[in-house]
Amino acid sequence: MQAIDTPFLLLFFRAVARRLEENREALCGLDGEIGDGDHGTSMANGFAAVVSTLRDIDAAKEPPSAVLRKASVAFLSDVGATVGPLYASALLQASRAFDDRPDLSLSELSTFILALADGIAVRGKAQAGDKTMLDAWLAAAHAARAQEALGARPGHVALKAAEAAEAEARATATMIASRGRAALLKERSLGHQDPGAVSAAIILRTLSDVVSDLAEQAP
Amino acid sequence: MSAAPTDGAARNADRARTKSPGLVRSALRFGEDPLVWASWLYYEEGLTQGEVAEAMNVSRPTVNAYLADARSKGIVNITISSERLKSLSIAGRLQEHFGLDECLVIPGEGGDRSLIDRLGAAGAQALGSLVHSGDTIGITWGRTMLAVARATENRDLKDIRVVQATGGTTAVIEYTPEACARRLAEALGARSIPISAPAILSSAEAKMILLSEPVVAEQIATFDQLDRIIFGVSSLRANSTIHISGFFDSALQQHDHYHNAVGSIAGRFIDANGAQVDGPLTNRTLGIELDQLARVPTRVLVAGGYDKVPAILAALRGGFVTVLVTDAATGEGILRADGAETEAPRSARPGQVDRSADFATRSRVKKFINAPRDAVSQSLDGALRAFPQFIAPIGKSLQAIRSSTAPRAGKVGLVIGGGAGHEPCFLGYVGPGLADAVAVGNVFASPPPDRVLTCTRFASTGAGVLYIYGNYTGDVMNFDMAAELAAGEGIDVRTILTTDDVASSAAEDRAGRRGTAGNVFVFKIAGAACDRMYPLGDCERLARKANAATFTMGLGLEPCSLPDTQRPSFRLGEHDMEVGIGIHGEPGVTRQPLETADAAADRIFDRLMSEMQSLPGARVALLVNSLGGTPMMELFILSRRIQQRLAARDITVTRCMVGHYCTSLDMVGASVTLMQLDDELLDLFDHPCAGFAWQNSPQ
C-alpha cells in the first residue's frame, strides 16, 4: 500500500476519528472562548459517522472516489453545524481528484490536500487570513506543493504540511476573525486560536502519521 | 470604595483636616475588618501610612500589608479612568514585552481626526524627539508615512538629509515613496535624497543595470548611512493598501511564493516571525534591504489598525523596531495576539481580582444528563412524550419534528430550525398557527440539509415553503443546501433570516446581524400569515416585515456549559457582565462592570430605542427572555424597568411576554426584545396558535 487508495482512506479516517475524539473537549473549550463551543463535538461526531458508515464497505470493490463521496454524505447528514457543509464539500472535492482512478500516488499527496482545501474554500467563501480552518488547510497545501516541487519523499511532504498547518493554527491567534460566529467578537478574538484551524492541523498531523507509518512498512 | 492615588492636592487637604482631634474614629464602624478600616483612613481620610498605623495601633508594615490586601481582595478598586493613562500602561507593556527603546501609544478615541492622521501626528512627535542636527533619516511610503510627513514641523535642525527608502512608483496614489520623502524633507528643511529609479523593475537584469548607474548607486549608498528610519508596515489582507495602491504588479497574487507573508516593509515581505519571504519580486525590488534596515540605529514603526496586527507583530518579532508608535486598541491587540498579559495591573481592574474567574479553578457544572452524546436525543424524546398534542417525529429521527396537525392543502409551509440548547426554541413554536416542522441540530449546531429537507417535504402542500432561522454561517450553509435540494423537487422555498440582535453589528449592517430571541416574534407572525392561507409572497413579506420591526439585546452574567464539557464556556469575573450576548453561550460584544438591574435594563433600552426611534404613541410587543439560568423573579425586575421607560416615552406595551422563550442552555442572563406593532402585525400577533411554548386561544 504505497498509494492513496481505499485501504489508505479507511486507515486515515479511523485515525482521524480517534484523534478528534481525544481532542473533543479541548476543541470545545477553544471554541467556547470565541464561538459557541460545539466544534469538538461536531468534528468528533462527524468523523465517527464517517467511520461507522464505511465500516462495512468492501475495500476491494469501492474505488476511493466512491468512499470519499460516502464519507461526505455521512459527515454532513450526521452533524450539520458549520463544519458539516465544509468538510462534506472538502471530501466531495477530494473524490473528484480521483476521477475513476483506483488510487493517487503518494507522490501526489499535495493534490489530495489541495482538493480538500479547495472544497472548504468553495463552500465557506473565506479568504486566507480570515482566521478560519481554511488558513491551516491552505498553509498545508502550499507546503506540500513546495516540498513535492523539491522532490521530497511523501513522508517528508506530509510532515511539512502538518507542521505548516500547526504553525498557521498558532498564527490564527494574531488574526481578527471575519467569518463565522467569532467575527462578532472582532478584536476580542485576538490571542485565541481558531478551533477550526486547530482541528485542521490535527487532521493533517494524522495524515502525516499515516503516511510515515506506510513509508516505514514499505520494502 | 474608589480612590484616586494621583489626586495629591485633595489628599493633602484631607490630611490637614484629619489633624484636628477627634476625627480618628474607633474601629467600631468598620466591624472586625481591619482592611476596611485601614483603607478608609488611607484613601478616604488621606492619612499617611504612619498615621494610619498610629490610629489603628499597629505597625506601619502591617498597614502596608492591609492596604495591599484590600486592593487584592477588591475592597479598594482603583480605576484608571483616563484614556491617556490606559495608553501609557499599554505603551509600557509593549515596551517591556518586545524590548523596545521607546513606545508611544495614542488613545483609542481621538475625536474627528482619522486614525491615520492621529498616528501621523504621533509619529511626527516621536520623530521630533529622536532626530538631531546632522542626521540622515530614511522614510518608506504609505498613507501613514505621508501623515507623519505632513504633521512634522520644522524645528530648525541643521544638516538633515531625508532618504527615500525605496524606488519610486507611478501608481496613482498620493502617498508614493517620492511624495513621502519630499514632504518630510520640506517639513524638516532637509536635503531630500530621492531614488532615481522605480521600486519594482521589470527584471533582475534591469535592476543590476540601474544599480551600476553612478547616480543611483550613490543614492542607494545612503541606505548604509541612515541614523534613523521611519517606516510603515502593510497588511497583506485583500483590502489593504498594498493591493489597491498599484505599487506591486500581479506577481503578488502568486500565492505560491508569498502565502507565508503576513506583511510588507519597504516593499519586502516578512512572515509571521519577521523572516524575509522571497519570491519573484525579491530581485526586482529596488530599495533598502531588510538587513540594512535592521542595522539602522533608530527604527521607528508607525502603524495602527486591527488588520495590521499580524504585520506589526511580525515586524516586532523580526527585530525591525526600536520605537513603536501605535494606538491603544491596536497595541492591546498586539499584546493579546502575542499571548502577553493584556490586563492592567490587578489592583487597577475592578472585577479582575477574584480567583473564581479563573477557568481552571471552576468546578464542573452539574447537569441532569446521562451520556453527553445522548443529551439531545433524550431531551427531544422527553419533549415528544410530554407534548404529543403539539409535536410528533416525522420519521425515525427525533430531530426532524412536525406539528401533530398536518398542514392543510394550499397552505404555505413554515419550516424553522437550529441547534439544540435553546429550548423551548425551536420546537415549542411548532403547531397550528405556528411552524409546521422543525429541524433540530446538535447543541448549538445547525441541523444538516437532509433533515431540513425531510421537514420541507412534510410542510410542503404545493403552495411553497418558508424557511425562517437565525442568521449564522452554519445554519445558512445547511438550509441553503436543503433549499437547493427542495428546489430540485419542485418546492418553492423562500428564506427569511432573523437578524434582531442589535449588538452583533452596526445598524447599517442589519443583514449581517444574528438572530436571537426575536426569532419567536418572527415565527409567530409568519405562522399566522401561513395559517390564514395567504399566498407565499405575502407570507414572505410579512415575515420580513416582522423581522425588520424586531430588535433584541442581551446581557450575560454567567457563561453556559455544554453537555460535552460541563465546564463554563468562557471566563467571566465575579464583578463583570457580558454585553451584547447571543444565544450560543458565546461571549458578548463587550465586557463591562456588573450593573444593577435598572442600569442594565436602561443600557438595553437606550440601545434599542436608538435603533427603533419609536415615536410617542407607538405600540410594541415586549419579550423579556431568560437565557436559561436567570429566574422569573429577576426577569420581572428587568421587565418592570423596561415598562417604566416605555411609559415615560408614551409607548404602549400592547403585548408582553416574560419567561424562558429562547435560551442558551444554562447561561445566566436575559434579553429584551421589542417589536414595533402596526395594525397588521398586531392582528397576526393575536391570531390563534398552539405550540407548547405559545398558545393563543381563539377570540
Image (cartoon, rainbow, N blue to C red):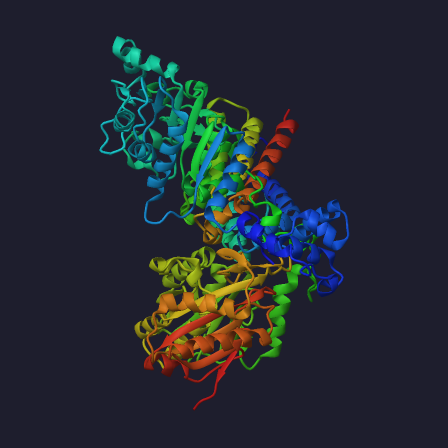
Q: Position of residue A167 (x, y in %)?
A: 54, 34
Q: Position of residue B548 (x, y in %)?
A: 35, 68
Pick the residue in front: B410 or B536. B536
- The residue sitting at 61% across, 68% down in the picture is B629
Q: Position of residue B338 (x, y in %)?
A: 54, 38
Residue at the front extreme, as displayed:
B21
Residue at the bottom extreme, as displayed:
B699
Residue A46 visible somewhere in the drawing? no
Quarter holding the N terminus of chain B?
bottom right
Q: In the picture shown, does residue A204 fall above or below A53? A: above
Q: In the picture shown, does residue B591 fall above or below B686? A: above
Quarter holding the C terminus of chain B?
bottom left
Q: Is residue B500 found left or right of A27 in the rendered image? A: left
Pick the residue in front: B114 or B306. B114
Q: Is residue B217 found left or right of A22 in the rendered image? A: left
Q: Position of residue B211 (x, y in %)?
A: 30, 12
Q: In the picture shown, does residue B410 fall above or below B548? A: below
- The residue sitting at 41% across, 26% down in the picture is B130
Pick the residue in front: B280 or B373. B280
Residue B79 visible somewhere in the drawing? yes
- The residue sitting at 47% across, 40% down in the picture is B331
